[in-house]
Image (tube, rainbow, N blue to C red):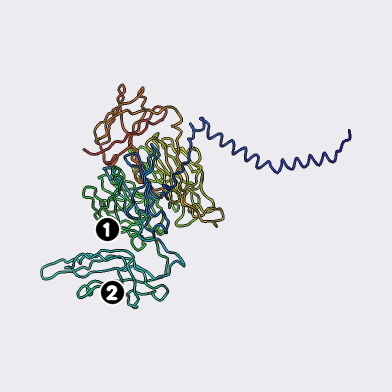
Amino acid sequence: MTRHPRRAAVALALAAGVVALNAGPAIGGARYGYHEWQVRTPEYKAERGSWSTMELPEEYRVNAIHAALLKTGKVLVIAGSGNDEESFDAGTFRSILWDPATDRFTEIPTPADMFCAGHAFLPDGRLLVAGGTQRYELLGDDVVRAAGAVSVRNEDPDAMVRTFPKGTRFTGPNGKAYQATSEFTLPPATKVEFHGGATVTASEVVVWAEALEAGEESVTEKPGQFTVEGLEGSDARNIYGMAEDMTLDKQDFQGTRHTYVFDPDTERYERVEDMAYERWYPSLVPLADGTVLASSGLDGTGRILEGQTEVFDPKTMTWGERIDLTRYFPTYPWLFPAADGRLFYSGSNSGYGPADEGRRPGFWDLTDNSFTTVPGPSDADLLETSGSIMLPPVQEQRVMVVGGGGVGESPRSTTRTATIDLDAPEPRYVDGPDLQAPTRYPHVVNLPDDTTLISGGSSDYRGKGDSDNLVASLYDARTGTLSPAAPPRTARNYHSEALLLPDGRVVVLGSDPLFADARNTIDGTFEQRLEIYSPPYLFQGEQPVVVDGDEELVRGGRATFELGGAGDVASAKLMRPSAVTHATDLEQRTVALDFTVSGGELSVEVPAAAGIAPDGWYMFFVTDSHGVPSRARWVHVSGS
């Protein structure tokens, strides 16, 4: 037999080269395969939980901008125009209702564009939705008509309230014509009589107007008085407009005054009294007395409100302006009702506003409009698009702030978490464990085992540069530790939301990336799939069962529930359902309940303070000695 050592050596070298070229992919594939196998094992799920992705039927796919868990257990998903200008121009506004128990979907008639509104639950379980989009922004070359704010005034105290339609024309001092882009209502002037005379103060409403003709000819650079079309006689003298200038500058989104309530029983929106101010990106804060405070937002001309505040009274279904409360915040400020009646501003917000105003955390006292700042946290200039949460239980009055980034389109972000004890003699933020990655837009959700899920987000503005974070963690406030959870499979950043479901799972919706590639050359698309997280406790044995019990709970009283099984109960709690948008959720709170167990009956004590458990609907959970929660029962808490 003849040997060919050179040929053998060449063949061996070629084989070695093939192995070398494929070693990286082979190893990477092996690692990926191992991860896919690992996340499916019972041991992994019991330690870190598990994620699953859900495709919606095509006819129910929407751009989820807002999500709220209703007292029926269904989730209301509000898109409005869904950050899609074509839908806005077409008047196509959408909401869907999802039942997690059956995975059935229902289309809900949506009467107005609730895109970027604010929302809060009323004590009876209806969802208050206020504000939204009056007009989309125009940038750069898209601005072709000069436009600006016109202050329309009426100097006649004896006039009737007048409503002017969209398209009402104004003629400026340059002779050019402009038209209102929305309907507006002008009340009469105010007259105050005194001995020997009277004073008259003109009424005023600010509207946005744009030139009828495109081009620079309609630009004005100095203040001027405008006549209002269609007025005669004394009306023409008493009613007029004033404007600073009309420009071709960037034109921001504009808010509306529209207010609706969504009724979980009829599954329909109902129109109620409008707000005093147009608001886009406002925070609606549920207060201990059952009213709802509206703060911040962009007005009907695209300017951020200077601190005007109003309160909705669910007893009269009307708004009342609080002229004594003038506190400026950036849009979607995180305002938490503290047990002592003050509002705590965590520093978290979702965008619009200058970098040097309204950014410092502190306490807002609603009795005298004073504001007391608190020290910290670190990276205090990176609180925009951060997350905040009242940690469980609410009786301990601890707030955590999570991640965040720089103002506007800044690429900067932080891994910082920090907590603050609101009841401390001198409250101050104390830094906690770092996140796995710098994170803007984090989802922060309290779970019934008293841990907190932190997931998703991106390190750059709206996921730019392929910067989405496919990571999740579980924070334990009892130990102050952060441990890794199973990673989500779907990227989530801007315009996304997450909320706890009655069965103990967490659903995550939305995401509106700016780009779809790392080089930022391909436009992003809105994520319309749902992703559901099943926490570790759902893989650690059977859930406790609450068979029956009281539905109406009175603060300061007791309630009883019938347990199934052996009655192994380690904790009992009330959890308020979420209403979330832009990763901002002001509803979450976990109320710990003292309890006793006798046989198969559980008796709980309901806290007496409205600042701890305000009127409203809650999920009632019990957990066993392993931290496994029951499915929730819906209960209603009130003061009587």
In this view, 392 is above or below 62: above
Q: Label 1's element? A: loop
* Labels 1 & 2 near each other (Cβ < 8 A): no
Q: Is residue 100 rendered to the left or right of residue 198?
A: right
Whether residue 378 is visible, yes or no, is no
Amino acid type at image mark 1: Ala
Q: Badge 1, how many Cα within 10 Å: few under 14, some, many 20+?
A: some
Residue 606, image x, y percentages: 27, 34
Position in image of residue 613 (x %, y %): 29, 39
Which of these two is toward me, 271 or 342?
271
Name the spot of residue 362 as percent of width and height, x first.
Answer: 35, 50
Residue at x 36% of width, y 75% of height: 222
Q: Nearer the viewer, mark 1 or mark 2?
A: 2
What residue is pinned by disc 1? Answer: 276
- Cα–Cα gap, marks 1 and 2: 25 Å
Query: Residue under circle 2?
Result: 227
Amino acid on which disc 2 is placed = Thr
Q: Nearer the viewer, residue 369 or 166?
A: 166
Classify 210 as above or below 625. below
Comes first in the chain, label 1 or label 2? 2
Residue 607: image location, x then y, percent: 27, 35
User: Mark 2: which secondary structure?
Assistant: strand
Q: Residue furthest right?
A: 2
Nearer to me, 147 or 307: 147
Residue neighbourhood size for the residue with mark 2, other residues' Cα within 10 Å, grouped as few (<14), some (14–19), many (≥20): some
Tell me the quarter of the image containing the N terminus.
top right
Name the image quarter holding the C terminus: top left
**Which label was assigned to residue 69?**
none
Tell me the quarter of the picture where residue 338 sits.
top left
The answer to whether 346 is drawn above or below residue 253 in the figure is above
Left or right for 114, reference 639: right
The answer to whether residue 15 is visible is yes
